[in-house]
Image (tube, rainbow, N blue to C red):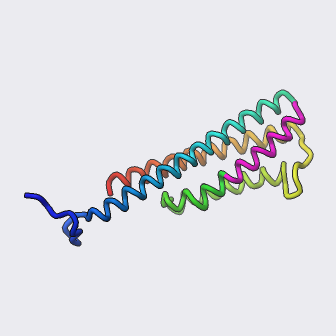
Amino acid sequence: MTQNTTSGTPGTGRKSKKSNTQNSHHVKVLDHSVIGFLDDRQRLIVQIMKLSSAIDARHHDIVEALTIRLCQQMVDYLSNGHFHIYSELFPNKNALIDLDATTQMGMRFHDEFVGQAGLLKINFDILKTSLERLTLALETRFELEDLMINQSKNMSLSA
């Protein structure tokens, strides 16, 4: 006996084909967005590593250029997460509080080293320490984002 899955009768546990198609489309769009987001994250990590190496080598001109680029990429990454990705992942209130804390730390780093008027004077030791703190905060953020992505995928699979 074949069930009619196009009716979507409430309370029967059956879903309509239209609902399944919409869910499938949402998952595909979300997957595409998340893949792009994770690619951006990878580029941010690479930028952090390049900057850290340049600081260690005391290459002033390279450090300046990499600091500017890191800050640009970081601001783009942070805002993309908040305004595009997280709304699709449905984070809980505690997750949003933790994400906001890392966003604020990233913006403080930006303001401290690049600021509104462009690159500010760089002290290698202060930049290195600040970059290490930022890296730890971003690591926490990445773990939280991964958790939200995995939870969202699990919810999509069970829907």
Horizontal placement of 145 versus 79: left or right? left
Residue in view at x 34 percent, y 51 percent? 157
Residue with the most extreme left position: 1
The quadrant of the picture occupied by the N terminus is: bottom left
Residue with the most extreme bottom position: 10
Q: Is residue 66 magenta?
A: yes
Residue in view at x 37 percent, y 62 percent? 22
Up-down: is 71 above or below 22? above
Horizontal placement of 2 versus 28: left or right? left
Residue in view at x 23 percent, y 68 percent? 8
Q: Quadrant of residue 155?
A: bottom left
Q: x%, y% of residue 108?
A: 77, 54
Residue with the most extreme top position: 57
Up-down: is 11 above or below 155? below
Q: x%, y% of residue 123?
A: 89, 40
Residues rendered magenta in the picture: 59-76
Seen from the viewer's position, the closer of residues 130 and 148 is 148
Prevalent SS, magenta region:
helix
Horizontal placement of 59 versus 33: left or right? right
Q: Quadrant of residue 67?
A: top right
The number of callouts visible is 0
Horizontal placement of 126 versus 98: left or right? right
Residue in view at x 90 percent, y 49 percent? 120
The quadrant of the picture occupied by the C terminus is: bottom left
Q: Quadrant of residue 25?
A: bottom left
Q: Is residue 30 magenta?
A: no
Q: x%, y% of residue 64?
A: 86, 41
